[in-house]
Image (cartoon, helix red, strand yellow):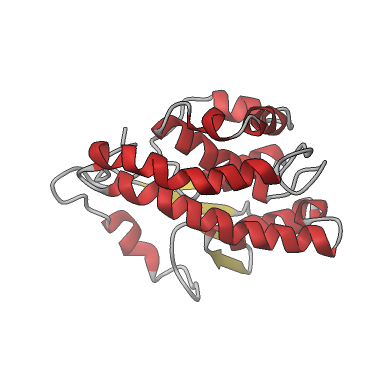
Amino acid sequence: MQRPVLGYWAFRGYAEPIRMLLRHLEVDFEDMMYQQGDAPDYDRSEWLNVKETLGMEFPNLPYWIDEDIKLSETFAILEYVAAKYSPSYLGNNMMEETHVVMMQGVLKDLKTAATKPCLSSDALSLIPLCRESLKPTLIRIGSFLEGKRFLIGDHPTWIDFYLFELLDQIETMCPGILAENSQNFSSYKDNVRSLAHVEEFIARPRMPFNYKKAGWGNK
């Protein structure tokens, strides 16, 4: 039996929460990292040369190949991994499952808002403005965490791995922003870190958050 393959660029981006979940669940997989060229061209041919050869319906990065299963898109891969290796991480009842789906939309929008300024050549001047624009959503997420160990309740779901990575990006970009908007983020992050293999995952040398052309998080 072949090991499943996770394909993505050699930076954190949209694949890091998948990598974290896989390590946590002790899944033996191949972490296929494509290299982007340096400036000025930032050549992407290492990926583009194989993109249409993988037999995928919607070839994109990240992708997941597990024998006959071929998926793209971060949320789809996270949900598949949870369903196969730890079904309780989908949620234990309809309400929990629905809240996971709801938070997908919330966190996707937050990820876009947090990442878009970083990709600009003017990132350093845009990040202070970004700090203010993220505040309303962070306050709401902080309130949603009240009385919970994890995002959906007292047990983890796959969405926690997405949120944890996103909070790390936001805090690195805007130091102090999480504590400014909710004291619940600190205990939440501690709870996720306490999960099996998460601490060792985040303790290893980390890759950049973004691709080489980004104005922030490219090193």
The quarter of the image holding the C terminus is top left
Going by the picture, which residue comes out furthest to the bottom?
57
Figure check: 53 above or below 11: below
Q: Position of residue 52 (x, y in %)?
A: 39, 71
The residue closer to the viewer here, 175 or 19, is 175
With respect to residue 171, does 120 lie above or below? below
- Residue 211 coordinates in the image, percent (x, y): 32, 45
Q: Is residue 93 above or below residue 17?
A: below
| Rendering coords of residue 96 (x, y %) | 79, 57
What residue sits 86% from the left and 60% below the top? 93
- The residue at the point 62 percent across, 25 percent down is 200
Residue placed most toward the observer, 186 or 32 = 186
Q: Nearer the viewer, residue 199 or 138?
A: 138
Q: Residue furthest right?
A: 93
Q: Please report the residue visible at 74 percent of the width from the left and 64 percent of the height from the top.
A: 98
Q: Is residue 22 visible?
A: no
In this view, the residue in front, 80 or 127, is 127
The answer to whether 172 is drawn above or below residue 55 in the figure is: above
